[in-house]
Image (cartoon, rainbow, N blue to C red):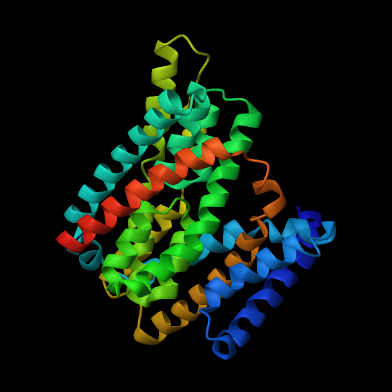
Amino acid sequence: MVTGAFRSLPGLFALGVGAVVAHQLSPLLGINELLLAIAIGVVITNTVGIPEILTDGIKTHNIWLAAGIVLLGASLTLDTILETGTTVLFLLVLVVSVTLVTVEVIARYFAGLSEQFSSLLAAGTSICGVSAVVAVGGAVRARETQIAYAAGVVLLMDAITLVVYPLLGNLFDLSGQVFGVWAGVSMLSTGPAVAVGFAHSETAGQWATMSKLARNALIGGIALAYASYYARRGTESSTSLRLLWSNFPKFVIGFLLLAVLASVGVFTDAQQTSISNAVNWLFLLAFVGLGTEIRIRNLRQIGFTPVFVVFAAMVIASALTLSLALLLL
């Protein structure tokens, strides 16, 4: 345990350096520091590469993202979360359902992809990116190559949306709430959704996080549904409470717990300011590491067909979400 912690130190130091560089360069370049942190990771991993000594520490970026999301709960109250909860829940259920069915139909009946691979793409696109791919892949006993390809498609879409969403948000002059819900409901992975949300505004970041966490919580039900479907068709599949719990985004619980504490006035203004600063730095650490996951060489090997399927579904889901968000919020 101690040895593992020491092995992580060089990579943690590298994440820290990247975070500080992004923080310092942001005002000079006029680029949001969170997006700049991701860009730093992308540039490094696709040019000089990541030395093996840094790998263990850089892989901890998911821990810092989860920690930042948990602490973000302290800046919100349950009244804020429930303010438009019914509307956001309606959007979530509708968009997730439409996206899931769209990917399944296009992938199976138009693109000619296998059933299991189609299901992995559908889960990753409609719920929470790579985490959903892994959860459903385990539930339906998908091949490792199928899981790897589906995860690659998700990462490619993440890279595209990280650029496109901020541009469209500025082009359409979207409010913080509309942009945040749009990003949280329609973007694939948690990290990019949170990043573009806070790059837009504090309000957008909070709504993007809340919407995405609510969407992530659907992962257990989707995995169970797929396992049941493939079991009835005679395809080897299995699921268990252990599998579902291992893939459930547990930071959702911590986020809600701190939101409850904030609602009853546990945190003073000074404490909330300190927590907000901590959240910002945790996100910077996380997003430098997130950038290192976007490897252009690997993305080139995915192939056009699955990318086209997910891209088409994302365009539909994104347009539907934005239209309804503008109408209802």
Location of residue 172 (image quadrant): bottom left
Location of residue 197 (image quadrant): bottom left
The percent position of residue 216, horizontal first and vertical second, equals: 40, 47
Mark yes or no: residue 242 visible.
Answer: no
Going 39% across and 60% down the picture, which residue do you hit? 255
The percent position of residue 170, horizontal first and vertical second, equals: 36, 75
The relative height of residue 170 versus residue 65 in the rendered view (above or below) is below
| Quadrant holding the C terminus | bottom left
The relative height of residue 24 versus residue 224 in the rendered view (above or below) is below
Q: Nearer the viewer, residue 264 or 221?
A: 221
Q: Is residue 183 left or right of residue 47?
A: left
Q: Residue furthest bottom?
A: 28
Going 44% across and 14% down the picture, which residue do you hit? 231
Mark yes or no: residue 85 visible.
Answer: yes
Q: Nearer the viewer, residue 245 or 315?
A: 315
Q: Nearer the viewer, residue 5 or 45?
A: 45
Location of residue 265 (image quadrant): bottom left
Going 23% across and 68% down the picture, which residue do you hit? 80
Q: Residue furthest top?
A: 234
Q: How many marks?
A: 0
Q: Is residue 168 left or right of residue 321?
A: right
Going 64% across and 56% down the picture, which residue do you hit? 294
Q: Is residue 93 left or right of residue 258?
A: left
The percent position of residue 257, horizontal first and vertical second, equals: 36, 60
The relative height of residue 122 versus residue 327 in the rendered view (above or below) is above
The percent position of residue 21, horizontal first and vertical second, equals: 66, 81
